[in-house]
Image (cartoon, helix red, strand yellow):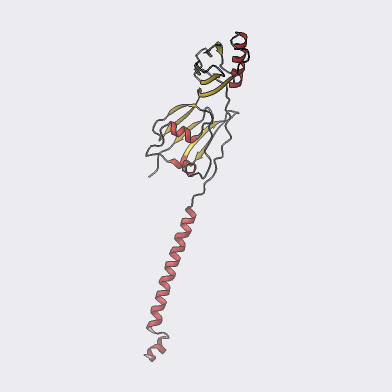
Amino acid sequence: MAVVRSLFGRSLHDVTMQKSFVRAAGVVTLMLGLLAAVQGCTHTAKPVNLPPPHNTTTLGVGDVFELRIVGEEKVPTQFKVASDGTVMLPLAKRVKVVGLEPQQIEDAVVQRLKDEGQLLDPVVTVKVIEYNSKRIDITGEVQKSGSFPLEPNMSLMRLIALAGGFNSMARKSHVTVRRQMPDGSVTAVEVNVEDIMANAIPDVPLQAGDSVTVPQRVY
């Protein structure tokens, strides 16, 4: 045996140990490769690069708002702007409100109540409930695509909720939001809604005229 060892320079034990070392090194190399691949595929949430919304609060035909006159709790409080741009208000009668801001409506009603001699020092508050004259579209893989009225502080998640949520085919990580800029150009951005749901990035505020597309998943 000593002759064999001297002839070949190593024993059977040495050969076995070397093979074990080679196998172990291969396993380590494979694990390092898998780790690098996983790190390379790690998703990094990125905030949406979309100009801030520019929403006017003027009322239009079909808009719904709440008007309260302090001390007059028994009168109606919710109103819808008629096709001629007016509303019939308690005590103040018919008032033109189309194109006015909520504060301007408050001032107009206060003045009308004074002019009519209904109240000496009226206090009026106006709160917009629904902007039917300002709408946002959503199409694609949602339960109910269509055009929805703008709500105060409308966001992408709120719009998706109004559309009944995603369907089973939705690719939530590639939702597109398109917005028309003041110069007439259109900006489109891709939004990973899963990041919003995970609180990794903020929700996306929307403006009137925005359009949202939810694509189909790729298998």
Q: Quadrant of residue 6?
A: bottom left
Q: Quadrant of residue 31?
A: bottom left
Asked whether 163 or 16 is in front, the reply is 163
In the rendered image, residue 137, in percent from the top left (x then y), is placed at 47, 29
In the rendered image, residue 93, in percent from the top left (x then y), is placed at 54, 10
Asked whether 5 or 167 is in front, the reply is 167
Asked whether 213 or 150 is in front, the reply is 150
Residue drawn 38% across the image and 37% down it: 167
Q: Residue furthest bottom?
A: 3
Q: Is residue 43 above or below residue 122?
A: below
Number of marks in the rendered image:
0
Quadrant placement of the C terminus: top left
Q: Is residue 39 above or below residue 177?
A: below
Residue drawn 40% across the image and 88% down it: 5
Asked whether 98 or 207 is in front, the reply is 98
Quadrant placement of the N terminus: bottom left
Q: Quadrant of residue 140?
A: top left
Q: Is residue 92 above or below residue 32?
A: above
Residue drawn 43% across the image and 74% down it: 21
In the rendered image, residue 205, in percent from the top left (x then y), is placed at 54, 34
Left or right: where 149 falls relative to 53: left
Q: Residue furthest top?
A: 116
Residue drawn 46% across the image and 56% down it: 38
